[in-house]
């Protein structure tokens, strides 16, 4: 069993965003994080889950804990209807972030996953850790961008 904790962050929506994941198995931990210069919070929440599942080797049993009801409800309740409706919502509008939902669906199909939700910023140790890491990924990206363009005119 692999325990996975994920979070996404965005400064502005859209704006610079980051994602992070913590995978725990057999006493070992693996930490993942990344950032994008212009994105949305929902895309970063999805990227955290995608990258965590992509890091798994072979079919696994996993518990994935997220503070995003968008991710948990999307994968467990809404996706089957979206697919049956040709990737349209109940309001007959195109599903936002379809590219990421399709990637998540493909990766999730390789594993047996229990999708759990935790309230964000509630003191949950692993959720706080991935929140901090997602924001650190944004900071690192912004610092790298500033350093790269940091000359005088």
Image: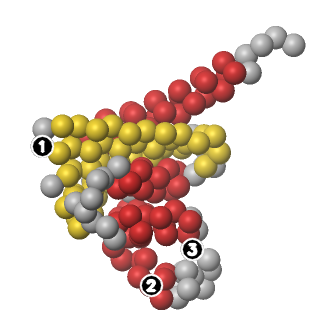
Q: Residue at x 39, y 47 (%)?
A: 7
Q: Disc 1 designates what residue?
A: 26
Q: Residue at x 55, y 80 (%)?
A: 87
Q: Residue furthest top?
A: 152
Nearest to viewer (mark 2 / mark 1)? 1
Disc 3 element: loop
Q: In the displayed structure, would residue 11 be above or below residue 95?
A: above
Q: Residue at x 49, y 33 (%)?
A: 137
Q: In which quadrant will I find the C terminus?
A: top right
Q: Earlier in the sequence, mark 1 or mark 3?
A: 1
Inter-mark Cα distance, 2 to 3: 11 Å
Q: Position of residue 89 (x, y in %)?
A: 54, 81
* Mark 1 in CB contact with mark 3 (< 8 angstroms): no
Q: Earlier in the sequence, mark 2 or mark 1?
A: 1
Q: Earlier in the sequence, mark 2 or mark 3?
A: 2
Along the line of sight, which residue is nearer the eye, 86 or 60?
60
Q: Residue furthest front?
A: 58
């Amino acid at each position: 069993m692999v325990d996975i904790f994920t979070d996404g962050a965005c400064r502005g929506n859209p704006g610079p965003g980051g994602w992070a994941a913590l995978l725990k198995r057999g006493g070992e931990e693996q930490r993942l994080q990344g950032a994008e210069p212009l994105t949305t919070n929902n895309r970063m929440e999805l990227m955290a889950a995608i990258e965590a599942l992509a890091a798994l080797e072979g079919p696994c049993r996993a518990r994935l804990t997220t503070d995003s009801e968008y991710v948990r409800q999307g994968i467990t309740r809404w996706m089957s209807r979206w697919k049956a409706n040709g990737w349209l919502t109940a309001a007959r509008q195109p599903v936002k972030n379809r590219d990421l939902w399709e990637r998540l669906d493909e990766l999730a199909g390789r594993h047996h996953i229990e999708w759990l939700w935790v309230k964000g910023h509630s003191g949950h140790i692993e959720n706080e850790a991935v929140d901090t890491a997602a924001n650190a990924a944004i900071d690192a990206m912004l610092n790298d961008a500033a350093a790269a363009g940091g000359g005088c005119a």
